[in-house]
Image (spheres, rainbow, N blue to C red):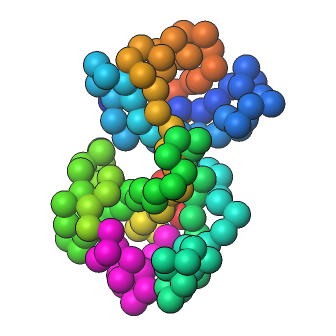
């Protein structure tokens, strides 16, 4: 499975935190996998977090159950946000977050070019493959990541 793959949960994951979610896989290697839930909004906006109270209201996404103390982001503006890692098809993970927030605040970039997540989804080696084999996830068609 390559970075950039979209996984959709199946009914086997109903009544779990992964019910009806789509996940963008951002990293997959011999150590495991990392990804973000791309279709669930977090219940607060960026400006509702103390550190970002002076920023314009901007949606946060509930990226997953791991490391919910940190923010992560994907974007399509490597020309403006340096040091991101290419996932696939002009979609990048991370980079200079301070610059990203300033560009959001200046309205230079919008939700059509960047998504910010609280938390992520992570799997140890072979765990995601086992969940796929059990039928908990299916590969989905690439959706528009940025609305």
Residue 99 part of the magenta segment: yes
* Residue beneath the point at 33% across and 62% down: 76
In this rendering, is residue 72 above or below 128? below
* Residue 4 in view: no
**Relative to 26, is 62 on the left or the right?**
right
Corner quadrant of residue 12: top right
* Residue beneath the point at 41% across and 36% down: 34
* Residue 22 in view: yes
- Residue 62 percent coordinates (x, y): 60, 53
- Residue 21 percent coordinates (x, y): 64, 40
- Please, what is the dominant secondary structure of the magenta stretch? helix
Instruction: Give the quarter of the figure containing the N terminus.
Output: top left
In front of the other: 142 or 8: 8
In front of the other: 50 or 89: 50
- Residue 27 percent coordinates (x, y): 33, 35
User: What residue span does the magenta drawing correspond to?
Assistant: 97-111
Instruction: Give the quarter of the figure containing the C terminus.
Output: bottom right
**Relative to 34, is 43 on the left or the right?**
right
In front of the other: 64 or 40: 64
In front of the other: 98 or 100: 98
Determine the residue located farthest toward the right in the rendered image.
15
**Relative to 51, is 2 on the left or the right?**
left
* Residue beneath the point at 31% across and 57% down: 94
In this rendering, is residue 18 above or below 98? above
């Amino acid at each position: 499975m390559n970075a950039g793959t979209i996984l959709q949960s199946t009914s086997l994951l109903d009544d779990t935190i992964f019910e009806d979610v789509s996940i963008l896989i951002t990293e997959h290697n011999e150590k495991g996998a990392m990804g973000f839930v791309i279709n669930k909004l977090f219940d607060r906006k960026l400006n509702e977090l103390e550190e970002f109270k002076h920023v314009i209201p901007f949606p946060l996404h509930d990226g997953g159950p791991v490391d919910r103390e940190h923010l992560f982001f994907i974007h399509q503006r490597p020309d403006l946000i340096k040091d991101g890692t290419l996932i696939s098809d002009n979609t990048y993970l991370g980079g200079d977050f301070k610059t990203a927030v300033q560009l959001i605040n200046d309205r230079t970039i919008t939700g059509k070019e960047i998504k910010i997540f609280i938390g992520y989804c992570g799997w140890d080696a072979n765990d995601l493959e086992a969940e796929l084999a059990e039928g908990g996830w299916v590969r989905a068609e690439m959706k528009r990541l940025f609305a």
